[in-house]
Amino acid sequence: MSTLLESFNYVRPTNLDQLNLLVMDYITKGYDFTFSAGGTDIIPRLKKQIFNPENLISLSGISDLKGIEKKGEIIIIGALTTLDDLANHDLIKKYFPTLAHAAHKVASPQIRNRATLGGNIMVDNRCSYINQSSLNRDCHAPCFKADGDICHIVKRAKRGDEVLCQARFVSDTAPVLLLLEANITIMGQGGLRKIKLNDLYLNDGIDNRSLRKDELITKIEVKIPENESLHYEKLAIRNALDFPSLGVAVCLSEQNLSVALTGLNPRPGLFKAKIKNYNNFDEMVSDICDQALAFAVTYNQDFFPRAYRKSMIPVFIKRGISNILKEKK
Amino acid sequence: MNLTTVSVNGLDYTKAVSPSMTLLEFLREELGLTGTKNGCDSGECGCCSVMVDGKPMLSCLMLVLEAEGHKITTIEGIAQGNDLHPVQEAMVEYGAIQCGYCTPAMVINGVHLLENNKNPSNEEIKECISATVCRCTGYNSIERAIHSAAAKMKGGCHG
Ligand SMILES: Cc1cc2nc3c(=O)[nH]c(=O)nc-3n(C[C@H](O)[C@H](O)[C@H](O)COP(=O)(O)OP(=O)(O)OC[C@H]3O[C@@H](n4cnc5c(N)ncnc54)[C@H](O)[C@@H]3O)c2cc1C
Ligand code: SF4
């Protein structure tokens, strides 16, 4: 018997048809289930009893969901591709070095050998009150994310508020994928649909993704950039193992500057500026920093004080730009 | 209970297990292979590293049922009989073992590094051991041990 994990039923389909039949069966019967890919986000949450699904559907046996290929100017990444394979793949290193870098910044070597890209863009939002052992959580009244009636971060929050829970978005790869305007393919009982990655994210720490229960991500598609250069920088206490306290991705082309943020609000931030709309470059940079600062909601939910995390946003944006300009020379 | 067959250090073991059993619990409690340690049980200390198809992964974050069809190597599978692996020898030689709790994981990660990179830089060695917490040595002796093992392995002492 497992020491920390509550019991659940486990199934590992080996192809997409089996998976579809299984999901259809569970949906018709009204069974509670959840998907697991590499399990490196979900297993700790199960151990901490943050949630207890009755059924775990493992995607790890479906080889059709793994691998990276080039079709014309598009690179297609299977959702089950591991972060280590992504970071070391020739196509990714050649066309998307910043994506390889961001994948390499996730957790630790051992975790990246198992963690998947699909799991990383789906990684659950985090808060210092919820991502704790159940013993620790028992010291506080259960918060909204634990089906309770209070938020320990925003005490005045109440059901019906636009943003009920402030648990932070923490994926390291998502900001880079957002700037690359990645699309994701979603498979569900209604068939396949393709959406922009940005449309996956909702601004709430609990209901933070736009997927239906029966839906899963099968692939991530990214167009090879023509003249854009990117940079990603992460603020974390330690290089290994820590989630981003702040992550800033910057993309610069002849025409545009764009910035994506992670580690702050319940959804990632995404801002774009067209160079032609400004009198000069500095004005544009200062405007995009203002937009990012206006978006960023920081609470004391993390090791770094909120004011520090916020003040690092413009620093990282400007550093990103100057690194890109330096590399171009 | 689910029936599963898992290949560990070259032998197949078939057992009935609970689906919520982790690979770590299976190794320690079902097979008695207690070399792999349980530290934080949540992916943060690296103690439970084992190789899955030759790559280090955390056995506390992996369900045993996920290990079916893969080759697991634990610290017990690293030495060949009484012959220690050069990484193990170097750990002894450099005093890189104190309380010993992180040692199996340091060895697993070090062996993987040297199998894939004959000339690791300081940075690469640091990254390889970065996610295994050691509270005794201060890491320097472990780094030196891996360096020395790399040099020895190039000399062709082992295997
Ligand atoms: C110690 C530690 C440190 C970490 N540090 C970081 C970090 O620095 N940065 C970071 O970004 N993450 C970090 N993580 C979290 C996690 O390891 C990564 O985000 C990882 O990429 C998750 O991928 P996975 O395949 O293991 O996901 P899983 O745990 O399998 O799944 C995560 C979630 O995504 C859903 N899911 C998975 N695949 C799909 C799919 N194809 N379609 C739909 N839903 C899916 C699952 O249902 C689950 O809710 C850390 C984890 C640990 C334990
Ligand atoms: S932000 Fe509030 S509701 Fe959300 S997890 Fe933290 S304490 Fe709970």
Image (cartoon, rainbow, N blue to C red):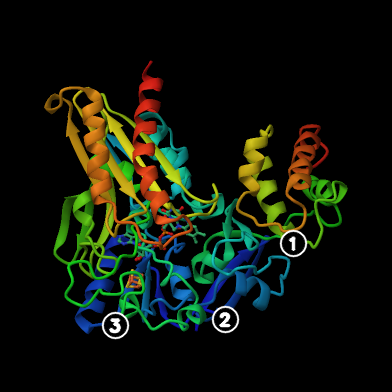
**The disc labelled 2 sits on which kind of residue?**
Thr
Residue drawn at x 26%, y 44% as measured from the top left: A292
Question: What separation in Å lies between label 1 and label 3 (alpha carbons)?
Answer: 49 Å
The image quadrant where one finds the N terminus of chain A is: bottom right
Q: Secondary structure at mark 3?
A: loop
Secondary structure beneath label 2 = loop
Instruction: Identify the residue position indicated by label 2 in the image.
Output: A3
Secondary structure at numbered mark 1: helix
Q: Quick check: A89 above or below A128?
A: above
Mark 1 or 2, which is nearer the eye?
2
Local packing at callout 2 (Cα closer than 10 Å; few below 14, some 14-19, many 20+) is few
Q: Are marks 1 and 2 in contact (CB under 8 Å)?
A: no
> Are tags 1 and 2 found on a single chain?
no
Residue under pointer 3: A149
Q: Is residue B83 left or right of residue A25?
A: right
* Chain letter of the residue carrying label 1: B
- The chain holding disc 3 is A
Q: Residue A193: which quarter of the image? A: bottom left
Can residue B76 be seen here? yes
Labels in figure, total:
3
Q: Nearer the viewer, residue A151 or A113?
A: A151
Question: What's the residue type where badge 1 is placed?
Answer: Glu
Check mark 3 vs ligand 2: CB closer than 8 Å? yes or no: no
Q: Disc 2 or 3, which lies upstream in sequence?
A: 2
Q: Is mark 1 within 8 Å of ligand 1?
A: no
Q: Residue at x 59, y 58 (%)?
A: B71
Residue beneath disc 1: B76
Measured as percent of width and height from the top left, residue A113 is found at 51, 51
Identify which amino acid the numbered label 3 is placed on: Asp
Q: Nearer the viewer, residue A92 or B40?
A: B40
